Image (cartoon, coloured by chain):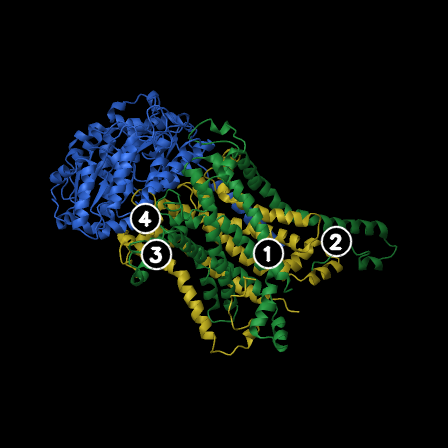
């Protein structure tokens, strides 16, 4: 699909028209060398800003954190930063039930919050693609959750999911004897947190899909419908394959986001001790990390959690990528 | 080229602007000193009233005071990060009483007030002990306001359940926590739909308030598992929960506020600042409250210490200010203007404090009740993770409230505590 | 496979120009309207609560209609939270970051999408890989670096500079350009002897504009709403808007009406950006479809 742009044309057309008035070979050689430099070297210049800044602000903290994870550093025990424990933190992590619990929570919440969300976003983007009245209002309207302030989100969802006087329980009253404590049961808390995540991020993904959908030429659809393809077939065979890079993108980004889920479970727990529920019902890995780091002051252990999560994310993102890639290519 | 020119100049301008916009110098070549103080609430000022600072500035020309407020969690988190990083703290930092135990393990990061000519006799021994290293050699902060502990109760709900409402009678009914829980059983039987107290965690903390050694012993060992006092407090609380006495509301959440407004519980452990809280959030319940003595006779919840981080550049000036802010005269002013209950013993004899009675709370003599709860408080032993352990217990009790088997909850709490406090 | 089968739309985009009004159309509007209501409700409720007094947030049944104190609470929150400065700071922070991110991401995204160079795939994988690092992880080292090496405690630069490039942005632009940028145009440019920069400028940028506008909008919103990092680096003297909101929540007794009034103040500029960039996107999107 990509052209071989680094193949230098043997002689640029205009050069052949110039005859011995200038020293053509030297100019030609200089120009083609410039071309080669441009074609071979300029890409590196274009990606340099990114890697340059990342090396300073991304790589250094990452490496430093790996170093911390081999110590038993706790700020409440001065001197502990110099105590090296090798890979002890990691072995402790392997047998840590709370960590396993956090992993399960993360995966569970991740799946229920990501899959429906992306499907929903795709559907909404499709609907918004039409020439509707009040397009701007509708398209920006779906993005409002993303611009709503964190503080407002926390307060409102806590009101909705409150046990005794919450809005949701008020609706469910006729169907239940006792009000449901959304934070007490694992499944309920997973649903609630997923609802928050879906609410927050669907508009975001919708906009991304919408932008990509707009790049699909009308002609493709017109010729397909002339050929007798119905609307569903058009969607499946034209829209989806054309959106392939975007779908890959959103799946990977959402997966990473799901594995790193923090804000919503953090806000859902009103007790401020970062436990993700009285028994860690909805404590995700990053929330566990946060608790170990800030509440318990176990910097070394938290760093080990962070690195372990990083490695897990690499594996999962890779698997995800290969899956989505393979499926799509069948329709290319 | 025009577009990239615009982009470049925008970025450039922004960087220049930010270079001018940030930062604060704390020393002026003219000998002027700007002291920064970080607070998490109304310790020394209200958002629209900084008269105490203005008074100090007038009396000390060349000193400017700049206050930064943040919310409770952020404030303490940032403080720890900045202490660890070695830069970024203010000249004075206020630390809440429940958090200060986390900092006594890092005494070198703070100025030691024991070396700064401070009369620690101004305060009760237990108050001073809380911010001191176990050996008593370092005092990292000076006490500002304090909570004390009493029991606030709803007179109307008591009357409905056939209980006495007079505060002295009520105080006599619960001179121990066991009696309090027994009374709770009576109440719940006669007042269906209303709970006895707001959260098990408060009962637990209250009971332990009378003990000298709770989670750590005087040698600094972690004794939470073996200490009978802790297990007894747990068992009592679990019993109360299983008898249906707890409304299971997390403190300071909007649901807790709703609990006040809807009268979901009849009693709540009440430090001095809780009065202002109830008045603000449940104004309609005026006159329906009263204050009785806390079971067990003593306790404390809340209050703060003002510390001077040792990374600061203006330590002497900051120490001066800290001493002034925590002097009895200033704290009477704070009591009158903001309502913070002073921790200095001499203020308790002053009429402004001693005669203070609250109309909202049926005229309860708050100015006498709270100092009493402080005077006899035992000097408790704290360790670096005391705050964390307290939080773990609250969470475990909350899970019992949600239906978990108490023994399981105890086991998992022990595991969490050992992991958090054991070896870092 | 699971990604698309569940979508049960019954109308195809092709019919969009000649679609008859009536059937199905109403369904579309109804669904979208319902979704908008869900999306906007929390913002609406923020306005309701911030137009009432302190006890409103705990009351039951919860208030659903605005009260009368909106202006009072807005002005109180504005003064207490130092919102004038906070809004300015947030504009500087989010604006600078957005410009830088869009600029660098389009450049790098183009390189990864359409140029061939040695190590391209490996480097791109590295870019995506950097997104796997959770931000909570780097707080202490980053804080030490920013405050001690650079001396930027309390300085907006400490918030801006670490965010100037975004792996997400590079990834996004690369995906966008690989489907939106027809290679034939690039080849045509090459044949005409144009340098890569010239091709980038005249051919790629116009095509990238809608995608860049979307990236710009999302980036701006992300950094406008960014809370955790500015919270640790800045203080009340130099806040961004979210830090200012968090600060109105200081104290043991929090007046939620003021806090939510703060969020209303913070959201207003976003709505303005919406209107500005929104038209850009709609307009750009309509033009962006490449025809033949």
Of all chains, the one bearing label 2 is A
Report the residue at 53% width, 52% height from top: A255
Report the residue at 52% width, 46% height from top: B14
Q: Secondary structure at mark 2?
A: loop
- Say which residue label 1 marks: A323
Q: Which chain is blue?
A: B
- Say which residue label 3 marks: A160
Residue B322 visible in this rendered orientation of the protein: yes
- Say which residue label 2 marks: A6
Counting residues from the N terminus, which is met first, the one under dot 3 or under dot 2? Answer: 2
Q: Secondary structure at mark 1?
A: helix
- Residue B43: percent from left, percent from top: 30, 37
Report the residue at 38% width, 35% height from top: B417
- Say which residue label 4 marks: B402
Residues tagged 2 and 1 counted as in contact (Cβ below 8 A): no
B17 versus A83 height, above or below: below
How far apart are labels 4 and 3 at the CA level?
Answer: 19 Å
Of all chains, the one bearing label 3 is A
Q: Secondary structure at mark 3?
A: helix
Q: Give me the disc on residue B138.
A: none
Q: Which quarter of the rendered picture does the C terminus of chain A lie within?
A: bottom right
Q: Which chain is green?
A: A
C131 versus B205 height, above or below: below
How far apart are labels 1 and 4 at the CA level?
Answer: 41 Å
Name the side, left or right, on which A214 lies relative to B153.
Answer: right
Badge 3: residue crowd in 10 Å (few <14, some 14–19, many ≥20): some
Of all chains, the one bearing label 4 is B
Counting residues from the N terminus, which is met first, the one under dot 2 or under dot 1? Answer: 2
Give the color of chain C as drawn: yellow
- Residue C104: percent from left, percent from top: 60, 50
């Amino acid at each position: 699909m990509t052209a071989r742009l680094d193949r230098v044309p043997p002689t640029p057309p205009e050069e052949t028209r110039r005859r011995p008035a200038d020293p053509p070979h030297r100019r030609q050689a200089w120009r083609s060398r410039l071309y080669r430099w441009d074609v071979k070297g300029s890409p590196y210049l274009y990606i340099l800003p990114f890697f340059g800044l990342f090396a300073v602000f991304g790589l250094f903290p990452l490496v430093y954190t790996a170093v911390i994870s081999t110590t038993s550093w706790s700020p409440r025990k001065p001197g502990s930063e110099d105590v090296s424990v090798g890979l002890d933190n990691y072995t402790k992590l392997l047998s840590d039930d709370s960590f396993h619990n956090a992993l399960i929570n993360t995966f569970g919440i991740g799946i229920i919050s990501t899959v429906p969300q992306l499907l929903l976003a795709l559907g909404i983007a499709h609907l918004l693609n039409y020439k509707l009245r009040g397009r701007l209002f509708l398209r920006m309207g779906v993005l409002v959750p993303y611009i709503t302030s964190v503080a407002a989100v926390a307060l409102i969802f806590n009101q909705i999911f409150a046990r005794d006087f919450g809005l949701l329980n008020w609706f469910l009253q006729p169907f239940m004897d006792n009000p449901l404590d959304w934070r007490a049961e694992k499944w309920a808390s997973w649903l609630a947190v997923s609802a928050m995540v879906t609410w927050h991020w669907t508009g975001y993904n919708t906009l991304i899909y919408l932008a990509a959908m707009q790049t699909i030429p009308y002609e493709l659809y017109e010729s397909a419908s002339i050929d007798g393809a119905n609307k569903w077939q058009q969607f499946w065979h034209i829209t989806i394959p054309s959106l392939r890079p975007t779908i890959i993108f959103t799946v990977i980004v959402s997966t990473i986001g799901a594995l790193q889920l923090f804000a919503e479970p953090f806000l859902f727990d009103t007790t401020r001790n970062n436990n993700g529920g009285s028994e860690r019902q909805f404590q995700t890995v990053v929330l566990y990390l946060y608790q170990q780091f800030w509440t318990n002051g176990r910097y070394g252990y938290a760093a080990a959690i962070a690195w372990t999560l990083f490695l897990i994310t690499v594996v999962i993102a890779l698997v995800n990528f290969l899956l989505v890639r393979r499926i799509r290519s069948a329709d290319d | 080229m025009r577009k990239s020119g615009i982009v470049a100049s925008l970025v450039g301008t922004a960087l220049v602007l930010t270079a001018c916009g940030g930062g604060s110098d704390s020393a002026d070549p003219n000998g002027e000193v700007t002291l920064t103080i970080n607070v998490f609430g109304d310790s020394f000022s209200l958002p629209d009233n900084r008269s105490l600072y203005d008074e100090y500035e007038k009396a000390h020309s060349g000193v400017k005071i700049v206050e930064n407020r943040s919310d409770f969690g952020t404030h303490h988190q940032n403080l720890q990060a900045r202490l660890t990083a070695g830069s970024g703290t203010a000249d004075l930092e206020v630390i809440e009483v429940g958090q200060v135990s986390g900092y006594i393990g890092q005494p070198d990061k703070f100025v030691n007030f024991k070396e700064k000519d401070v009369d620690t006799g101004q305060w009760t021994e237990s108050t001073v002990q809380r911010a001191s290293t176990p050996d008593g050699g370092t005092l990292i902060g000076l006490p500002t306001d304090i909570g004390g502990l009493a029991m606030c109760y709803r007179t109307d709900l008591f009357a409905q359940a056939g209980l006495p409402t007079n505060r002295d009678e009520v105080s006599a009914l619960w001179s121990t926590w066991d009696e309090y829980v027994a009374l709770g059983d009576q109440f719940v039987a006669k007042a269906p739909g209303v709970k006895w107290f707001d959260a098990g965690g408060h009962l637990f903390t209250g009971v332990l308030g009378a003990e000298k050694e709770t989670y750590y012993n005087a040698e600094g060992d972690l004794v939470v598992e073996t200490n009978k006092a802790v297990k007894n407090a747990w068992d009592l609380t679990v019993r109360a929960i299983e008898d249906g006495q707890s409304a299971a509301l997390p403190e300071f959440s909007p649901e807790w506020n709703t609990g006040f407004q809807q009268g979901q519980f009849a009693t709540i452990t009440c430090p001095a600042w809780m009065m202002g809280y109830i008045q603000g959030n449940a104004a309609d319940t005026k006159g329906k409250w009263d204050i009785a003595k806390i079971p067990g006779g003593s306790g404390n919840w809340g209050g703060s210490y003002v510390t001077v981080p040792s990374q600061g550049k203006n330590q002497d000036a900051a120490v001066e200010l800290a001493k002034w802010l925590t002097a009895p005269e200033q704290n009477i002013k704070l009591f009158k203007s903001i309502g913070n209950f002073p921790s200095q013993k001499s203020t308790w004899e002053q009429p402004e404090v001693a005669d203070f009675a609250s109309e909202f709370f049926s005229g309860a003599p708050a100015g006498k009740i709270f100092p009493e709860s402080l005077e006899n408080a035992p000097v408790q032993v704290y360790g670096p993770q005391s705050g964390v352990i307290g939080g773990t217990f609250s969470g475990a009790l909350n899970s019992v409230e949600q239906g978990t088997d108490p023994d399981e909850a105890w086991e998992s709490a022990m595991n969490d505590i050992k992991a958090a406090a054991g070896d870092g | 496979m699971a990604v698309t089968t569940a979508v049960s739309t019954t109308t195809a985009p092709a019919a969009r120009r000649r679609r008859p009004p009536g059937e199905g159309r109403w369904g579309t509007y109804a669904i979208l309207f319902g979704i908008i209501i869900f999306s906007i409700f929390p913002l609406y409720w923020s306005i309701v609560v911030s137009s009432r007094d302190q006890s409103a947030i705990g009351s039951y049944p919860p208030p659903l209609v605005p009260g009368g104190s909106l202006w009072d609470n807005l002005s109180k929150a504005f003064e207490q939270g130092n919102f004038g400065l906070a809004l300015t700071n947030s504009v500087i922070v989010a604006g600078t970051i957005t410009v830088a991110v869009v600029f660098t991401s389009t450049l790098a995204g183009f390189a990864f999408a359409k140029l061939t160079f040695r190590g391209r795939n490996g480097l791109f994988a590295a870019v995506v890989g950097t997104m796997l690092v959770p931000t909570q992880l780097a707080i202490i080292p980053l804080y030490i670096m920013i405050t001690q090496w650079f001396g930027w405690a309390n300085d907006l630069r400490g918030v801006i500079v670490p965010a100037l490039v975004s792996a997400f942005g590079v990834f996004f632009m690369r995906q966008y350009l690989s489907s939106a940028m027809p290679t034939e145009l690039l080849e045509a440019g090459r044949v005409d002897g144009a340098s890569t920069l010239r091709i980038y400028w005249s051919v790629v940028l116009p095509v990238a504009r809608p995608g860049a506008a979307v990236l710009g909008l999302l980036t701006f919103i992300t950094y406008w709403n960014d809370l955790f990092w500015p919270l640790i680096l800045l203080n009340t003297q130099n806040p961004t808007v979210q830090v200012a909101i968090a600060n109105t929540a200081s104290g043991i007794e929090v007046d939620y009406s003021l806090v939510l009034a703060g969020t209303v103040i913070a959201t207003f500029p976003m709505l303005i950006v919406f209107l500005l960039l929104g038209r850009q996107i709609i307009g750009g999107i309509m033009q962006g479809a490449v025809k033949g």
